[in-house]
Image (cartoon, helix red, strand yellow):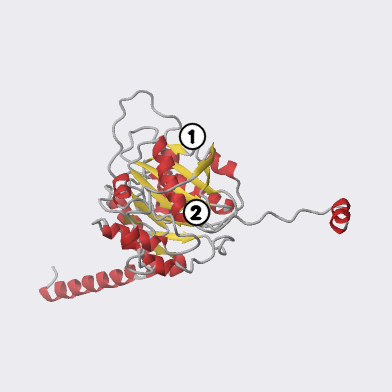
Amino acid sequence: MFSFQSKKIYLFMFMGIQLVVIALLSREAYQKSVTYFIHILRKDKASIPTGRNQTSTAVVANGGDVYANLSRLSKAHSQGENLTYCPKTSPLIVGRINVRIHSNFTMQEVQRKNPLVVRGGRYRPPDCEARHRTAIIIPYRDREHHLKVLLYFLHPFLQRQQLNYGFYVIHQAGNYTFNRAKLMNVGFREAMKEEDWDCLFFHDVDLIPEDDRNTYVCDVNPKHVSVAIDRNNYKPTYKKAFGGVTALSPLHYQKINGFPNNYWGWGGEDDDIAKRVSRAGMSISRPSLKVGRYKMINHTRDKGNDVNINRFNMLEKTHQTWKQDGMNTVESRVISREYHPLYTNITVDIDTKAGLPPPPPPPKATTMADQIQHHG
């Protein structure tokens, strides 16, 4: 039999060992192991299969391949119209994704890795009825590499969330000054012609999400999604930021009269949109900094997208202009609509900046006859 004094000593030793273990687990080197066990215990947040797939799924939870877990999907859509709704929280969601940006793959390889994506970049879950229908609107010009990388990561990312979704690349024709907000207005209009989407994500082509708990569905209020970008050390830029990746429902979009059409060049339109949200009596929702993480593809500013030097003066007048300039005044001409395997490409002519004439045509090469006539 142990004496009372011996029991007391063993109790203190046991408590000391527990304190040491807790201290070790709190160290960064042990955080991945802790995360793995949390995912096992919290079955309502993630489904960790047993057997051969257990290791690969655990890797995804700690920052693994975005295509992991998709092998669990049926390779064909279920027949009939009596599908049950997908779970409110997708069992395919596991958290952090390891985003390694490279270019040693082709668009055809991305297509092969996403066999359930159909013409025009459309997808719906094969074995349940999606609870949400989300359109991805991408303002675009001459960024083929960025588009390929975005599609590589974002298609499986959205499939893990069990969404009914579609990709719309809104391609500005010509080499005139870029107008991101006006392209997004056109994207909203053209996407809603095809489907009664309940949420639209306006998505810069160079931002890749890093956590699939960052769900691409709309909130009660307009949502700023890309709150933590690696270029900014995953810290928010400023309190009212509303750029990069944003989400609005059709009702939100109507309330703010869409986006401004008169911001030509880089900068200003995001702040104008944030002001419109406030003017319409709404607030901006955001995911946490741990979930709303994005990696930016490094690049230099595009030609034709110089800084808009008038943006601050324009922002001072938003309270006067937001009801007169927006979705109710957008003008454009669709040049072509092409249904690619992974996205719908809509090339549009959105005209040029007001008062800015088209660039002059290149000088015509002169011939010997022209020179003789000129000097005659």
Residue that badge 2 annotates: 205
The answer to which of marks 2 and 1 sits earlier in the sequence is 1
Front residue of 328/47: it is 328
**What mark, if any, has residue 118 been given in the picture?**
1
Task: Point out the image quarter for the N terminus.
Answer: bottom left
Front residue of 303/111: it is 303
Q: Residues within 10 Å of mark 2 (few under 14, many from 20)?
A: many
- Numbered label tally: 2
Mark 1: amino acid: Val
Considering every residue shown, the one lying at the far front of the view is 376
Report whether 24 appears left or right of 105.
Answer: left
Q: Position of residue 302 (x, y in %)?
A: 57, 61
Mark 2: amino acid: Val
Q: Position of residue 112 (x, y in %)?
A: 55, 39
Instruction: Work out whether 131 lies above or below 307.
Output: above
Report whether 67 appears left or right of 220.
Answer: right
Tag 2 secondary structure: loop
Residue 276 visible in the picture: yes
Residue 99 visible in the picture: no
Front residue of 49/232: it is 232
Instruction: Specify the quadrant of the image occupied by residue 17.
Output: bottom left
Task: Point out the image quarter for the C terminus.
Answer: bottom right
Q: Position of residue 334 (x, y in %)?
A: 51, 41
Q: Position of residue 32 (x, y in %)?
A: 38, 61
